[in-house]
Amino acid sequence: MSAVLDPATPSAAPAPSGSASAGPRTTGATRGLLAVALLLVGLALVSLASLAWGARDVAPSAVWDALLAPVPGDNDHLVVRDLRVPRTLIGLVGGAALGAAGALMQGVTRNPIADPGLLGINSGASLAVIVAIAGLGVSSTSGYLWFAFAGAAVAAVVVYGAASLGWEGVTPVKLALVGAALTATCTSVITVVLLTDTRTLGEYRFWQVGSLANRPLDVLTAVLPFVLVGLVLALAAGRVLNALALGDDVARGLGQDVVRGRLLVVTAVVLLCGSAVSLVGPIAFVGLVVPHVARAIVGPDYRWIVLLSILLGPVLLLAADVVGRLVVRPSELEAGLVVAVIGAPVLIGLVRRSRAVAA
């Protein structure tokens, strides 16, 4: 597979400091800064679209007034402030968490098709939500929050602990295999419960499909500190991922503590995935597609890939949410469904492009 898609190959990894000429580094930094500026503009535009468009369109001027000088009783202002502002903020935070988690997953496992579900984190969160619904009678989104977060954390601890057994310790292959095994186990248990409990099925399916709608703002305020810590750790992990992309032996030769580096990345993934799944459900494809787009823009340097993924994630998630509101008005499609429709062809196109480059 090409260097664009396979960060495990030495050619895909950035050269250690001092070994490359200044020209390529300058060009990469210039591309990165330009991409960041364009993505910030895109993020502002898609946020405005999220506030203005839906079953009831609101003029941009009315959106501005609703944010700065709301009029009590004005229907447009109520729609913007009470419904769309929380939805947009949740999309921004959830998308950033999913994008960063996907980049970290692909880096730490050296697997170009890794996403936040690879380590069993999504399935662990889903199983915890099933336990909350079927065993404890929880029926609100805010009630699912801590169960989903705890399930994601327990799944990550189990996977990392099991993968660390053996003389070679944690390796990308072992992480992926243990994560796949945990995912299969959790999915089997979830299926059994859903087939035998129709009430749980009805409650669970609305959360499982992934959506930004009907998420109270207090859910966001509860997980925001975890997201911020996770994003800081993700940005700090760029150099670690660059070293790991060269292989464990080379990384150790460069002075990198491989075990501590992987633990840092997995901690960030737990915080980000747990927060994102708690906020918007187990939405697929954001964490899978976004890092590939970032890599196609700035190359294999994970310091830039993680940063761009943090910005690309909310752009994709909010754009999908807006499209879902518009295509079947006055009803709407959940963002998770639209992301899958958008993400699948984008990923196929990136794979075809990378093969053409490699040929």
Image (cartoon, rainbow, N blue to C red):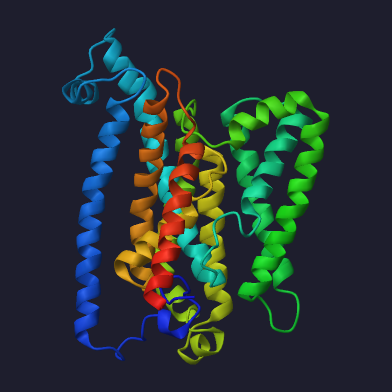
* Residue 289 position within the rendered picture, expressed as x and y whole percent measured from the top left: 45, 56
Counting from the top left corner in percent of width and height, residue 257 is at 53, 81
Dividing the picture into quadrants, the one containing residue 59 is top left
Across and down, in percent, residue 130 comes to 72, 36
Quarter containing the C terminus: bottom left
The image quadrant that residue 65 belongs to is top left
Task: Name the residue: 70% across, 73% down.
Answer: 164
**Is residue 151 visible from the viewing direction of this image?**
no
Q: Establish if 347 lies above or below 106.
A: above
Q: Is residue 318 visible?
A: yes
Q: Residue furthest left?
A: 61
Report the residue at 68% width, 25% height from top. 202
Q: Is residue 323 left or right of residue 18?
A: right
Is residue 198 or residue 40 the one in the foreground?
198
Total numbered labels: 0
> Which residue appears at 60% of the width and 54% of the height?
117
Where in the figure is residue 298, as x and y percent of width and height? 30, 68
